[in-house]
Amino acid sequence: MEIEVVSELIEQYGTEVMIFCRRLTGCVPDAQDLYQQTFLKLMEMRVRIEREKNPRAFIFAVANSIWKNERRKLMRRALIAPSFSLEDAQTQDALELTDTEDTQQQVIERICRQQLSLAVQRLEPKFRTPILLMYGFGMSIEQIAQIERVPKGTIKSRLNRAKKKLRKEMEAYGYGE
């Protein structure tokens, strides 16, 4: 793909792709790497993206594919040499409240959103990705099925199971009772 075309895609969809990468990976450095790898892969590809055929879904599919491949590599490496996880430290950072001028309701809403976000991050990738694409980016089931390369029924099932898991986890925190 030509540099000019990729530049246009970055201009048009770059922010959304970065947000998707951030939510997919769970941390900024990995998201930045995935973002760069996605657009580099697009430059290497010898395909033309047709404007009528939803280029955003195609770009998300490329990012998702790269991310899945990276996860497979990391899993293989973890079997050989396990690594230390900083997940607990990241969770604490995410829950810190810094703005003292918030009203009590705003603080409660922020904590609820943070807990929901953490619950989404804890979902298995096959459940997390459809949730992010549908509710974070407003994609249809058909578009998500294209990105994931699975039937629409599978996406519907994964969305349903993910929502049940999220509902159960949020109820454990005392929400929705």
Image: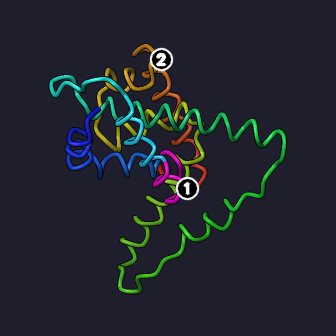
Residue matched to label 1: 174
Q: Which residue ends up furthest to the left in the rendered image?
A: 52
Residue matched to label 2: 154
Q: Residue at 56% x, 37% y: name it.
A: 165
Question: What amino acid is labelled 1 in the image?
Answer: Gly
Residue 29 lies in the magenta-colored region: yes
Question: What amino acid is labelled 2 in the image?
Answer: Thr
Where residue 63 appears, x then y in whole percent?
Answer: 43, 37
Label 2–label 1 contact, CB within 8 A: no
Tag nearer the camera, 2 or 1: 2
Left or right of residue 163: residue 61: left
**Inter-mark Cα distance, 2 to 1:** 30 Å
Majority secondary structure in the magenta region: helix
**Which quarter of the figure has residue 130?**
top left
Residue 58 lies in the magenta-colored region: no
Q: Which residue ends up furthest to the bottom in the rendered image?
A: 100
Q: How many marks?
A: 2
Of the two numbered discs 2 and 1 on the same chain, state the one appearing first in sequence. 2
Q: Residue at 30% x, 23% y: name it.
A: 47
Where residue 104 appears, x then y in whole percent?
Answer: 40, 77
Where residue 125 appears, x then y in whole percent?
Answer: 56, 36
On screen, 11 above or below 53? below
Element class at badge 2: helix
Q: Which residues are magenta?
A: 24-33
Q: Residue at 66% x, 33% y: name it.
A: 72
On screen, 82 above or below 143? below
What is the quadrant of the N terminus in the image?
Answer: top left
**Closer-to-camera residue (27/142):** 27
**Closer-to-camera residue (141/174):** 141
Label 2: few (<14), some or many (≥20) within 10 Å? some
